[in-house]
Image: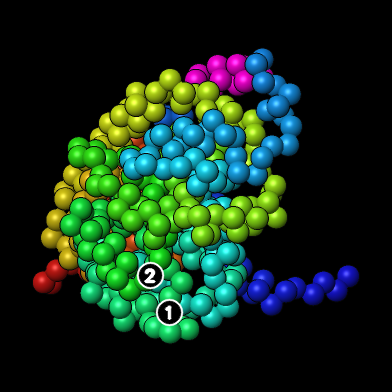
Amino acid sequence: MAWTLAARAASLNPSVIREILKVTERPGIISLAGGLPSPKTFPVDAFARASATVLRRDGEAALQYAASEGHRPLREAVATLLPWEVDPDRVLITTGSQQGLDLIGKVLVDAGSRVLVETPTYLGALQAFGPQEPEFVPVACDERGVLPGELASAAGDGAGRARFLYVLPSFQNPTGRLMDDVRREEVVATAAELGLPLVEDNPYGELWYDTPTPAPLAARHPEGVLYLGSFSKVLAPGLRLGYLVAPPEVYPKLLQAKQAADLHTPGFNQRMVHEVIADGFLDRHVPTIRALYRQQKDAMLAALEREFAGLDVAWTRPQGGMFLWLRLPPGADSLELLDAAVEVGVAFVPGAAFFAGEPDPRTLRLSYVTSTVGQIDTAIARLADLVRDRGDRVGD
């Protein structure tokens, strides 16, 4: 049979990360690659109890079709959890925050539309927006995130003005960087002055280690920011449960796109999550995640300091989240390094895939949350040996 693919199918490409995860299934591989939360943090017992309660109390409703907006009590709970005044009618429950990105692309992006992204940015967002055939415009960033002074020229003007800036202010994927309070104010003020909408993706904001993250961009300008959140990192990703908070001008169309995509997010999952979090469970549970991830982050930073001493290698020092970003010596290529690393039992994600514009081949992303301290020590030592073996010693 001769199937004819739509032209947009050409923009659908496999996730580099998902392909690398296949490699990590090999026996003996220590994976620093996946953006997976630690399964040690999954509250299995709490969900076992919630499942039984939901089925006993609301079984028929939980297994039936449901409202596209989402389970009303869960939407109200989300509005209460967020650190600014949120109308539950502005909350849309999504099948993971990745679906939220897909809906935003369908509703806000036309072919050729300008979409601003950080440098580097979340690969999944590039994949979600890509089928709508936007013109991605990377915005220069420093260790504090987007440079506000770059927004005016990047946004353009007239009919070609950017549709939005996509930004992860808190413990960004892939770099782990945090946008501080001052920079957030500057970005919001500049965007408001330019009339530039913001799409704020915040799956990691609650995973701070020592100091709570600054208020979200959406808290500072609710009508100018479309906010995405997720239960994947604070409960479990297998639930596929996220949410977005949208200004009234765009909420109806996002809802209609959601209806066309999957009718609704599974009602049983929504009711289970609501049952789990109803008694303040997250206030008790999330600190245990932070404590575990802080320990693993500290172990990776210590290993990097120890093993990469004398090498022209730099890395971020995250204050939360799940990732750090490493830059190899001049002339190095992380994609080539990956092949050698897999041979010695280590996997990571090369950085090039996270750039919407010219990639930096020297960069790579390391995740520390699913490995033990011993595995982290072993993996970093092996990577350092590979870099040395490839002749990248400083000053030699």
The answer for how far apart the CA atoms under marks 1 and 2 are is: 8 Å
Answer whether residue 253 is magenta in the image. Answer: no
Residue plotted at (45% across, 37% down): 78
Q: What residue type is labelled 2?
A: Leu
Q: Check the picture and name the quadrant holding the C terminus.
A: bottom left
**Residue at image mark 1:** 161
363 sits left or right of 80 in the view: left
* Residue farthest right in this picture: 1
Which color mode does the image show? rainbow
State yes or no: discs 1 and 2 in contact (Cβ < 8 Å). yes
Residue placed most toward the observer, 45 or 275: 275
339 sits left or right of 317 in the view: right
Residue placed most toward the observer, 4 or 167: 167
Query: Which disc number belongs to residue 196?
Result: 2
- At mark 2, the secondary structure is loop
Magenta residue span: 44-55
Up the image or down, 113 lies above or below 172; here it is: below
User: Measured from the top left, where is residue 73 in percent x and y?
Assistant: 54, 30
The mark nearer the N terminus, 1 or 2, is 1
Answer whether residue 51 is magenta in the image. Answer: yes
Disc 1 packing (10 Å; few <14; some 14–19; many ≥20)? some
- At mark 1, the secondary structure is loop
Q: What residue type is labelled 1?
A: Arg
Main SS, magenta region, reads: helix
User: Measured from the top left, where is residue 188 in percent x and y?
Assistant: 29, 62
